[in-house]
Amino acid sequence: MANITRIRTMQSLHTFLVAGLFFVLNLVIASQVIAADEPPTNEELEQQLEQAAGDKKTAIYLELAIKNRNEKPQLTIDYGKKALEHIRQYPNDEDEVLVLCNMAWSYMLLGQYDEAEELSVRGLEIAEGIDDIKSLIVPLNIAGLAYWRQGRYDEALALYHRALDIARELGDTSGESATLNNIGLIYVENGDSPKAFDYFTQAKNLGDKLGDKHKMTIAMNNIAGIYSSQSSYSQALEVQLEVLKVREELNDEPGTAEISLNIGITYIHIGEYEKAHEYLKRALNFYEPVGDTRAISQTLNAMGLAYFNQEQYDAAAVHYDKALYYARQTNDKVMEANALISKTELQIARHMPEDAQESLNKAMALVEEIGLKPLEVKTNFHQAEIFLIRNQLDEALTHIQTAIELATEARERAQESDSYELLSRIYEERGEYQQALEAYRKHKVLDDDIFSQTNSDKLSQLQSLYEAEKRTKRIELLERDKELQAAKIQQQRFERNVWIFSLTLLLFIALLLYGRYSQRKVNQALSRALETQTGLMQAVAHEFRAPLARVQLGVDMLEELDDGDKKVFQNINRGLGELDSLLKEILALLKMESRQELEEFQPVIVGDLLAEQIEAYQPLHPNKTITRAEPPRGPAEFQLPKKHFEWILSNLISNAMNYSEQQVELGYRSSPSALEIYVDDDGPGIAKEDRDKIFEPFVRLDPSRTRSTGGTGLGLAIVSRLARLYRAEVRITTSDLGGSRFVIYWPLHKYIK
């Protein structure tokens, strides 16, 4: 009986996750955030914050909060706090309500229900003052969820019913469907399965009406949960397999993993443990790569239960320990308490009372902090079991009586029944056989009531299903007749259009073949022209260098013979030096453009490379200072094309030294996917509209960036092309030193040309 109670608790926990997933969808709709095909990353949104102001900045903070609330709830809380600070300067009640609701949701994921309740109630109070009643739907549901997670079902139900009335008044079908599911889940907790079944059925019908299979499968999954709670596992499994098929058709991987977990739990009920492991592993194979620690913990706990029922206690212990580890990673106290209770049950079954007591003490501390009565019932129940094993009968009697009181108060009839059965055994050990008999009779009465209620619930559900099936069949007949008429018309259109399509296809193929033939000839001509042009430019550059060298030699000889004014010769030498540098850069650029070859990657210690560059450039500019920022924590060695990377870095540093006033600073940081190196200067900076231009060859910006400051005008062009060759990116922003910051984002994955 203890195992049955435990499984039901697991299902209750899973039901909470289903409601959470659906409620997230409700929040997205209510917040009116339009999702793009490829939503912006956190980094991109952070960059937008730099340019945003006023309400736009609040909107970006809100988008960041919504984006991270499931995977990184603490990040949502941090962004929410920033958004609230900004809202104080630019008041907006609607945005403040959504920020508070998202923060409350994140606190619930972290198991911090007091903070969640405080923020959700505050959001509801603000929404009460907004003229648009639609703004009440989200805070009503969030506040209801906060009450529900604390076992305050009546308060939660009142808020949900109010949200349902508003959704119906506004014709908000999506909000109505979400709230119907939440109300149904409350009735499940209250043990009123017929009412829960009715609300889930309404939610399912709304999903059908909207054509939203996702909403429909959520309601169906909850209906399966009712079947399972009534021990109708075959019916539950039938519904769950249907849900699985739909979610696979929708290519909904998270939904498929979720229903696979449910199916695995149902197979545990049925006793087909190998099948259970098959579906639970499928769920785990999805959750582990995405890092969903909460779902991983729940799945591992279920796998541990399967091994426990197979009496493979060592395997069960391993999975319970892993589930406990991930629950602590998630910082979900409910999950952690359940994992500890699982360990306690296993240790009791293995006759290890001392270990069981240690696990239970940790669980009881968490349960006392959370304040959930169903978990208090379980901890008192297992404490009584441990005292019974130790033959501490008075203490066992005290705890089992507490468990019965709490189970009665929480309307946990299955746990109340199990507790009376254990009470009977305690009285029997004490030699109080009359009390033992009375306790056992109460256990039997409760079991019979549960059995009768289950059958009554099944009858009500069957009647509801029969009426729904009749309506469905009537609609299907009308739709089938309509489809038949449409098929006849479609057949006539098809026969008429097939010849037109065939002729059009033949013409298209002919044009395509001719176009490809013409394009091939054009490409060949262009390739030959480019090769000729490149060769000619290289030849000109090489030929140009030879006479320049001779002129340079003659000037040097004149300079030695003539002791007069050497300024003219110095100017000639300077000009010739500039021409020589220019030709070298042109040849390098041409070579790079024509070859496009990648250098072999090798290990490079970036800090040492920066130090070498500082040592090379500092003597060339004795009146300026070049420094290196404090290296960050983490890896210092990276796989890089050393020669090309030094070329890029050298050009960036040379550019910064030329245009700085007194100071240049180098630094770097890294992430698992990219290396980021920046070069700061305290020069005049670059206007935003000019930042793309400076990567073009021979482009200089007036008045500050001209040949008088040095350089050929090709250094940054070479940087841009080398970066593009390795799929890196060069950006320009404003430096903390007051000038420009050149940042190179270098991908760390292996480059494939």
Image: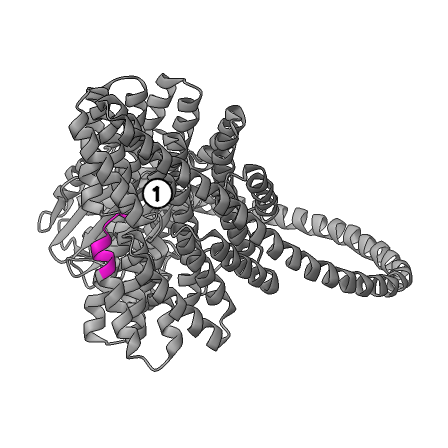
Residue 376's image quarter? Answer: top left
Identify the residue at image location x=84%, y=57%. 507
The residue lying toward the viewer, choosing from 519 and 590, is 519
Expressed as whole percent of the image width and height from the top left, the position of residue 602 reads 34, 27
Q: Which residues are magenta?
A: 110-117
Q: Which residue is mark 1?
A: 746
**Left or right: where does residue 311 sit relative to residue 237?**
left
The residue lying toward the viewer, choosing from 704 and 69, is 69
Q: How many numbered tags mark residues here? A: 1
Q: Is residue 213 above or below residue 650?
A: below
**Left or right: where does residue 483 sit relative to residue 34?**
right
Residue 671's image quarter? Answer: top left
**Left or right: where does residue 623 sit relative to residue 617?**
left
Asked if residue 596 lies in the magenta stretch, the reply is no
Residue type highlighted by circle 1: Trp
Q: Residues within 10 Å of mark 1 (few under 14, many from 20)?
A: many
Expressed as whole percent of the image width and height from the top left, the position of residue 666 reads 19, 46
Identify the residue at image location x=44%, y=20%. 310
| SS for dot 1 | strand
Expressed as whole percent of the image width and height from the top left, the position of residue 558 reads 23, 47
Q: Is residue 125 above or below residue 602?
A: below
Main SS type for the magenta part?
A: helix
